[in-house]
Image: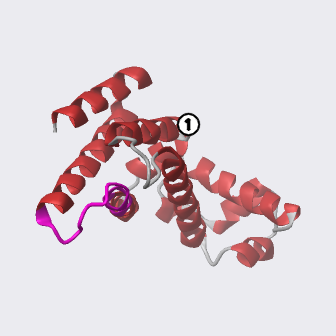
Amino acid sequence: MDRRIRKTQHAIKQALIAQLKTQPLAKIRVATIIAQADISRSTFYLHYDDIYDCYNQIVSETIATLLQELTQTYPADSTASFSELATACIRYVVAHRELFELITQSSDHQTIDRLKAKLVEKVLAFEHLDRQNPQDYYDVVCSVNGIIGVLTDWLTHGRISQSELTTVVTNIIERI
């Protein structure tokens, strides 16, 4: 992809992220984004169908990058543990905290549901577990939902440090 295109898309996405800090997605207008990104309306529509398309691309890229990162940390043929996967997940979320805060605090629960579903499938594959086996499937669903729930709560309330959060999550996983 051309460097100018990436730069323009980045400016648009950053403008949308900045707007999401102050108002819900449904209230953000293209006019505000193009003014902040210093681009024309036609340039915006050259890259995105609408605000929701831009938001969905940001979310999809974030989830895809998280999964790619987790695959490197937790490859299917390794002896890595689910605790290591959770630790890698926490590191990634902390590194991209602002974006995850916006995603988890939005009223769009579909985004979190997409993330959970992708993580469940990834863990099932990594652990060589049978999706058709109810015990395997629901063990993973419980673990993934628990970690996402803990991360969401931590992003919202942030009562403990990242290292304390990692310890708490690792301890929970070891007890399961």
Q: Residue at x 60, y 67 (%)?
A: 54
Identify which amino acid the numbered label 1 is placed on. Answer: Ala
Q: Residue at x 36, y 21 (%)?
A: 164
Image position of 149 with respect to 33: above or below: above
Q: Nearer the viewer, residue 143 or 126?
A: 126
What kind of element bears circle 1? helix
The residue that disc 1 covers is 95
Query: In this rendering, does residue 96 appear at all?
Result: yes
Q: What segment carries the magenta color?
A: 120-134
Query: In this rendering, does residue 161 appear at all?
Result: no
Q: How is the image coloured?
A: secondary structure
Q: Is residue 131 magenta?
A: yes
**Number of marks:** 1
Where's the C terminus, which quadrant?
A: top left
**Residue 57 position in % (x across, y down):** 58, 66
**Residue 88 position in % (x across, y down):** 46, 39
